[in-house]
Image (tube, helix red, strand yellow):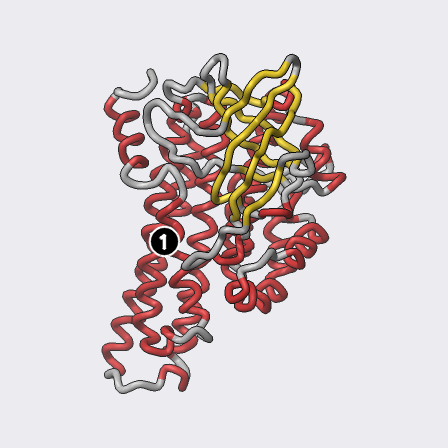
Amino acid sequence: MAEMIDAAEKVWTELDSRAGDLDRLGGHPTENYMLLQEAGYLRGPVPRELGGLGAELPEMVGAQRVLASACASTALMVNMHLFQVGAAAEGWRASGANEAPLRRVAEDGIVLGSTGAEAIVAGAWDTPTTAVRLGADYLVSGRKYFCSQGELIDVVRVNARDSETGEICVIAVPTSSPGVSFDHTWDTLGMRGTASHDLVLDGVVVPESAVGVRLPASGPAWDPAFARVIRWFLSGVSGVYVGIADRARDVALDAATSASNGGFRDAALTDVMVGELEAAHFRSAAVLECGLGRVLGESDIIDAMTQAIVLKEEATTAAVEVVDRAVALVGGRAYFRRSILERLARDVRAARHHPPAAPVSHQMVGMRLAGRGPER
């Protein structure tokens, strides 16, 4: 069964109809989220036993690919919720952990947010966000950027440095807590509808139980708990950008075979460009399929994360090529704001900014394969 993909297809037309306005206005896609909630999409990776659709990683990636072909901003934004749900569901299947938050996603419809866009490096990390112990609680203060979903988030996970131990703590913070606010800073080239505003934490008090994971500051990227989450994140991101490539191909082929592409290009040259576009699209789809297989084929979670890093780099690079070839095929009409390709050409370039991004991504892969990372 592929209920999550079915849910994406169910809302496709309505999301597509709003994508242009969402891009122009750069607002919160509240109506899109209501549709996704009604279709069960936001509880897609929750196990069936806990009230979800039971989607595992391949189905989630496929659903994100479909959704992104309608509205890339919505798909990228919801990925920040889904990867956390998927990783939590994997933990539940392995050990029974995370049942309470998974049930809240399924039954109460809560939306999870993440603030992991701070620089991910191969070695030691630090963060200016602090967690200061106050008896049985923590006082959390700092500013996070690229916090996709904005005010739609119910619970946001933030990285903060424990002022006593120096560890990087991953802390779940309800956005209704006193001291939590959003600074509307998101005004960007592409992915304008993701509502990725700055999150401000001004002396937010949370109980110690809100600390879900403690990562060693000396190298948190190599911790298995981090690796499990990043595997879901990067795989989902890859599906989003290949979905953009899918739409670009379709739009360009429609234009190439209709009067809307009426220019003075030689027909034989157009045929060559169509063939080159199809080859590039074939590569993007093949990279996603093959790469996801390699991610799932690794029994060691650090190796799985390493493959997910490669998948993201190669799938997004291929997606950018597809969109660029589609734009070239359509020609000057793709330069107009009314063109879907104009929006896709901007959206696809956000792929370069998802951490770990090149060259850090390649450094991490190289370290692992060369034996200079954690022991295999």
Image spot of residue 369 (x, y percent)? 27, 26
The structure residue drawn at horizontal position 51% and vertical position 63%, both measured from the top left corner, is 23
Q: Residue 122 falls in which quadrant of the image? A: top left
Left or right, residue 79 beside residue 258: right
Residue 96 in sight from this viewpoint: no
Kindly state the secondary structure of the residue where label 1 is placed: helix
Image spot of residue 207 (x, y percent)? 66, 21
Image spot of residue 26 (x, y percent)? 53, 60
Q: Is residue 28 above or below residue 313?
A: below
Left or right, residue 243 beside residue 368: right
Q: Is residue 371 above or below residue 72?
A: above
The structure residue drawn at horizontal position 57% and vertical position 41%, both measured from the top left corner, is 82
Say which of 186 and 273 sits in front.
Answer: 186
Q: Residue 235 falls in which quadrant of the image? A: top left
The structure residue drawn at horizontal position 26% and vertical position 20%, both measured from the top left corner, is 371
Left or right, residue 209 beside residue 162: right
- Pointer 1 residue: 284
Image spot of residue 303 (x, y percent)? 38, 27
Name which residue type carries label 1: Ser
Q: Is residue 250 above or below residue 263?
A: above
Residue 129 in sight from this viewpoint: yes
